[in-house]
Amino acid sequence: MVRVTTTMSPEEIESTYGARETMEYDVVMVGAGPAGLSTAIRLKQLAAKKGCELNVCVLEKGSEPGAHILSGAVMDPTAIAELFPNWQELGAPLNQPVTRDDVLLLSETSHRRTPDALVPRNFHNEGCYVISLGAVTKWLAEQAEGLGVEIFRKPSNNDAGQRGMERSEELNVVQRACSRASARRNHRRSEREEGAGTAR
């Protein structure tokens, strides 16, 4: 294995590749999941309540919020009601309320239902909703953007391909340097082995 290491100062990097584009924000959230989006939403709500400007952005690795959240869930609407008391009017995708809980003891051929009185309280889901967590995340992203939160998603394949083409020549230079270094190392190894054989 050959490791090629180059050390460039910040000034050399800037002169070679140009100045990096920068954008300043007051708050940066990493991950456009339910927690990150809810935090961004609440910050913008509090800022609006106090009449101050707060720049908030969310960085998401997926092509869109919710793209990596595939699970279903049973959701207590208390938290979303604290963010948006009118969540039903806003069209939040909480469409299927829980109508019944069954805790079953299974055998090879049948099952037996546990009486409700024996089921722990945290197993009861009255007032909750059966949801798609991905759909809820996507809806939260729409609400966040409506409040002025900026969400940066993963670039599309076309954008990544264009960036790859720009870097291809640089990668070729590194690969050629690695090949030359490997050839020199193999040559030196062969000379040492031949020298050792002559000495014997």
Image (spheres, rainbow, N blue to C red):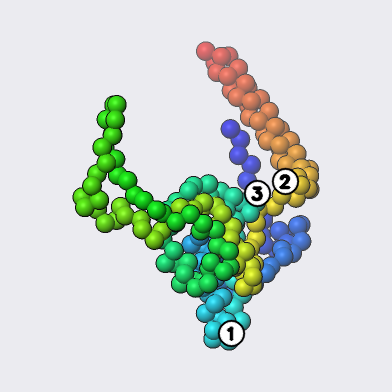
Question: Which amino acid, by three-letter code, is at mark 3?
Answer: Thr
Q: Position of residue 26 (x, y in %)?
A: 58, 74
Q: Earlier in the sequence, mark 2 or mark 3?
A: 3
Q: How many neighbours does mark 1 have within 10 angstroms: few (below 14), some (14-19), or many (20 or more)?
A: few
Q: How many neighbours does mark 3 have within 10 angstroms: few (below 14), some (14-19), or many (20 or more)?
A: few
Q: Pick out the residue farthest to the bottom.
A: 51
Q: Earlier in the sequence, mark 1 or mark 3?
A: 3
Question: Which amino acid, by three-letter code, is at mark 1?
Answer: Cys
Q: How many neighbours does mark 2 have within 10 angstroms: few (below 14), some (14-19), or many (20 or more)?
A: few
Q: Is residue 40 visible?
A: no
Residue at 56% across, 75% down: 44
Q: Position of residue 101 (x, y in %)?
A: 34, 49
Vertical side of 126 occupied by 181: above or below: above
Q: What label does residue 6 carry, if any? A: 3
Q: Choose top left, top right, bottom left or bottom right for residue 110.
A: top left
Q: Going by the image, does 157 lie left or right of 31?
A: right
Q: Is residue 11 visible?
A: yes
Q: Secondary structure at mark 2?
A: helix
Q: Secondary structure at mark 1?
A: loop
Q: Earlier in the sequence, mark 2 or mark 1?
A: 1
Vertical side of 157 occupied by 12: above or below: below
Image quadrant occupied by the N terminus = top right
State which mark lies toward you, 2 or 3: 2
Which residue has dot 2 on it?
Answer: 157
Which residue has dot 1 on it?
Answer: 52
Residue at 52% across, 63% down: 36
Q: Going by the image, does 59 lie left or right of 76?
A: right
Q: Position of residue 74 (x, y in %)?
A: 42, 53
How many marks the image carries: the answer is: 3
